[in-house]
Image (spheres, coloured by chain):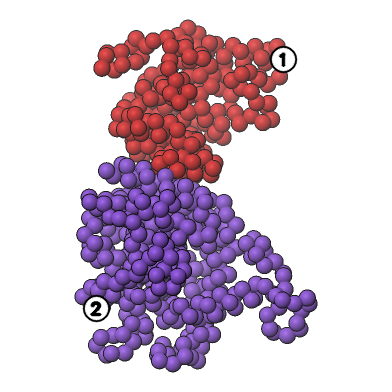
Chain colours: A purple, B red
Amino acid sequence: MIAECSTVQFDSLTLDGGAALGPVEVAYETYGQLNAAKTNAILVLHAFSGDAHAAGISHETGKPGWWDNMIGPGKAFDTNKYFVICSNVLGGCRGTTGPSSVNPATGCPYAMSFPVITVGDMVRLQKSLVDWFGIPRLLSVAGGSMGGMQALEWAVSYPDRVVSAIPIAATTRHSAQQIAFNEVGRQAIMADPDWKGGNYYGGPPPARGLAVARMVGHITYMSDDSMREKFGRRLRDKEDFGFDFDVDFEVESYLRYRGSQFVNRFDANSYLYITKAMDYFDLSYRHQSLAAALGPAECRFLVISFSSDWLYPSYQSQETVRALRSRNCDVAYVELESNYGHDSFLVDVAEQSELVRGFLASTFEKAQ
Amino acid sequence: MSAQALNPAAKAPAFVHGVLGRRDYAIIGDIVAPGSLVLDLGCGEGELLEWLSANKGVKARGVEKSSARVQRAIARGVSVYQGDIDGGLADYPDQAFDYVILSQTLQETVYPRKVLREMLRVGRRAIVAFPNFGHWRVRLSTLTSGRAPRTALFPYAWYESPNIHWLTVQDFEELVSLEEMAVERRYFLAGQRKVTLLPNLMAEVAVYLVGSSAKK
């Protein structure tokens, strides 16, 4: 399955912060066919560093999508049956307007003049895309991590536009620990002299700061178990310690590699803006309780968490589920056993696939 | 539809067909009104809920402790959440369901009295099916062996049995009146037959439809 990325432009987007941003471009990919009644559309929502390329082989890069093991013919999100859409989030750097985009008013990249955005803003832009497709109701909105946060936002903000939501390894509000790790990443970027207050476009990017941010991120996506299993204390290409500060351990080599790879595909300012949006995310903000905040939600929910995920621990999903239950919502929930930490939703998908497949099939059947 | 089908209790046939191989499921299927909102506690892999949903058009929800069973239930399209029955209903608002079902699980709960109360708080009616430990074979087993009963229906050794509360038909009736709840219907089964005489001695399985009494 070869995937093509397309873009569509919208004149203006009103933001939670009060500003209006425009024009706004959205990069998206689609898989499968929209049926005549437009009842089989699923919006898949990417996590922090993901993009619109969720499935298939990219025409441009030749690489598989970030959820290729979940989306495709016969897979959990079965493209023989469903029409799957994935778009790059607002503030991103993979085709959708973000801080690295050129501000038409100045002819220069927005950089730090880009307005601070929220998960609500990301979802509002996705809704424009869904409107543009002429889809009255999405069969499902689904995603892991920040994608799951967007799915929850969709369910609350546009209850009449979604039949079901699948938030995986997600939360209704970022915790102090989650904010703390994001802040470490942001500080690493801003401490890099190449960051230059965000005005590094045209020169060298703050590669060292961004790489360190990504290294910290990667640690939080794994688990003690998975790191022990994958690296242990194994040395990298040597028999003994080097007694210097070059790479000794496999785990160091892995993190450095991941950090340097990330610099090639991700914009440091997008890192700042998107992590800030995640940290602001709190559905219960300005509500009496989480249950009150979830009041408007009418759709069916499938909530999934993973036993070894310490970044988005199961208690956060259970908090979501309890609040939904107190509203008597239709909610299915399970904690899956996995050693892969927060990354489980991307890599350990056998059981997750069966859950999503069955949930979507029954939701589709009931919605017809 | 015949009068008999409308009111199965009135002139019930002695023989009960199984649903999914379970006679208590067949009775529960008879009791539950079409289109109602049902919560099944300890729903296993969601077979009963799936059947009720397909045959009675109910909106089905379930609670199950085992992750593996929850996964199979969700995969078959039933909305089940992983949780504990003892204390797990606290989040639900009052009278959220038309029926709360507890099938062959009351004897496995740590606080059966609390569970029964909670069932009638979150549901308008409770359907409780349980194995009758007063059945003559159970009594005979204990009497002759001098040990915890082991029968075809209760094959476990005492140290492996999930059944931590051994109740009889009479015990359940007593708890219901103690709680000032009202038995609306009661069914007794032995094998494939309905039991009408001496249910405390002759019934292997009892199914009760319980509502809050008018006093409450």
The picture quadrant where one finds residue A162 is bottom left
The numbered disc on residue A22 is 2
- State whether residue A67 is above or below residue A48: above
When the figure is inspected, residue A355 is found, relative to residue A242, above or below; the finding is above
Mark 1 element type: helix
Cα distance in 3D space between marks 2 and 1 = 84 Å
Q: Is residue A106 visible?
A: yes
Looking at the image, which is closer to me, A309 or A17?
A309
User: Residue pushed farthest top?
Assistant: B197
- Left or right: B119 in relation to B112: left
Viewport quadrant of the N terminus of chain A: bottom left
Question: Which residue is found at the position 36% from the left and 22% from the top?
Answer: B30
Amino acid type shown at disc 1: Ser
Q: Are marks 2 and 1 on the same chain?
A: no
The structure residue drawn at horizontal position 36% and vertical position 51%, both measured from the top left corner, is A80
Q: Chain of mark 2?
A: A
Around disc 2, counting alpha carbons within 10 Å, would you say few (fewer than 14), some (14 to 19), or many (20 or more)? Answer: some
In the depicted view, which residue is nearer to us: A150 or A142?
Answer: A142
Closer to the camera: disc 2 or disc 1?
2
Q: Which residue is mark 1?
A: B145
Camera sees residue A113? no
- Residue farthest along the right direction in this orientation: A240
* Image coords of residue A353 (percent x, y): 47, 51
Q: Which residue sits at x=52%, y=68%?
A: A177
